[in-house]
Each structure stands twice: as C-alpha cells, then as structure tokens.
Image: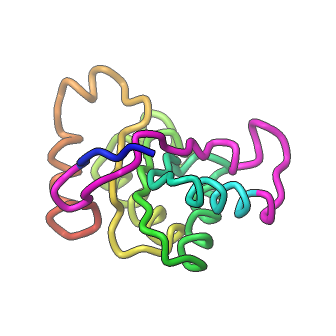
Amino acid sequence: MHYRDFSGSIGKVSEVGLGCWQLGGSDWGALSEEDALSILRAAVESGVTLFDTADVYGLGRSETLIGKFLQQTNAKVTVATKLGRFPEPGWPGNFTQAAFRQHVEASLKRLGVEALDLEQIHCIPTEEFRRGDCFDWLRALKQEGKIR
C-alpha cells in the first residue's frame, strides 16, 4: 500500500480508501453487522487507512458501524464523512448554519469521536456553493474543534 500526506493534523493516509456506502445496507442490499465489521477489518489488514462515508448512508448506519469498529481497534484510520443529503431537515434546509451544526454533531455521536477528520459537503446546490456561507460554517465548526 502506498500512503500520501493528507493534511497537517491528519498525516498520511492510504492512496486506496474504502467507500462505505454499502455498509448502510439500504441501497446495495442487506448487510449484517458482522459482515460490515469484517469488511472494515479486512480493509485495515490490507493497509487501508481511509474510510469514506456519509451521514445519509443507511441514515447513519454506515457511520455507526464505523464508530463501533473504531472502538474495537487500535488502528489509525482517517474517516471522511459528508453532510447535505440527510432527509432531516431535508433539501434545501440542509444548507443552513444550524443544519450543518446538527449534522456534524450527529456524525460525531454516531462515529464516537471528539472531532471529525474530514467533513465534506454532499451535493450542495451550486447557488449555495457560490454564496460561500458554507465555508464560514465549516471554519466555525473547525475552530470549535468539531472538525479537524
């Protein structure tokens, strides 16, 4: 496995990451908790140190399973998650400062971590992106220590 520098606070991550949409168990068919944890374990044993997920994958199930895995291992894993597609408050209400905070705090709880390694915006409307407020909201959450 090859590794690359990601960011000052994160350090090196594997060039190959594990996409965790399938752990949600809703869009790709049923997946048991045991199988999900086995997938995460096999990825780490293969040298993967980057998991990509989102709050909407299985309505939080993917993040919850990753959180459970993180509690069971000493492996250094970077988790990249996303916000913006969760059904509550929904579209376009997900693109407010209050909704960003709500979604970040929910991800923190599901993952069982004090700070998110990486928070990404999932399918943001172009006009919201261009307005630029979302960047200020993310910076504020980073300054509070909720996002690395």
Residue 73 position, x and y percent, is 56, 76
Magenta residues, start to end: 7-35
Query: Is 133 displayed left or right of 2 in the figure?
Result: left
Q: Quadrant for residue 67, please give it.
A: bottom right
Residue 133 position, x and y percent, is 18, 39
Q: How many marks?
A: 0
Query: Is 114 displayed left or right of 109 in the figure?
Result: left
**In the image, is residue 128 part of the stretch drawn in magenta?**
no
Color style of the picture:
rainbow
The residue shown at (29%, 45%) is 4
**In the image, is residue 30 part of the stretch drawn in magenta?**
yes
In this view, the residue farthest toward the top is 126
Q: Quadrant for residue 102, please give it.
A: bottom left
Q: Quadrant for residue 116, please give it.
A: bottom left
Question: Which quadrant: the N terminus?
Answer: top left
The residue shown at (60%, 46%) is 20
Give 132 or 31, whichever is nearer the viewer.
Answer: 31
Residue 148 position, x and y percent, is 24, 61
Q: Where 71 sits versus 135, above or below?
A: below
Give 65 or 58, whichever is nearer the viewer.
Answer: 65
Give 2 or 16, whichever is nearer the viewer.
Answer: 2
In this view, the residue farthest toward the front is 1
Query: Is 6 displayed left or right of 34 in the figure?
Result: left
Query: Is 101 displayed left or right of 90 in the figure?
Result: left
Residue 38 position, x and y percent, is 73, 61
The residue shown at (34%, 47%) is 3
The residue shown at (36%, 75%) is 114
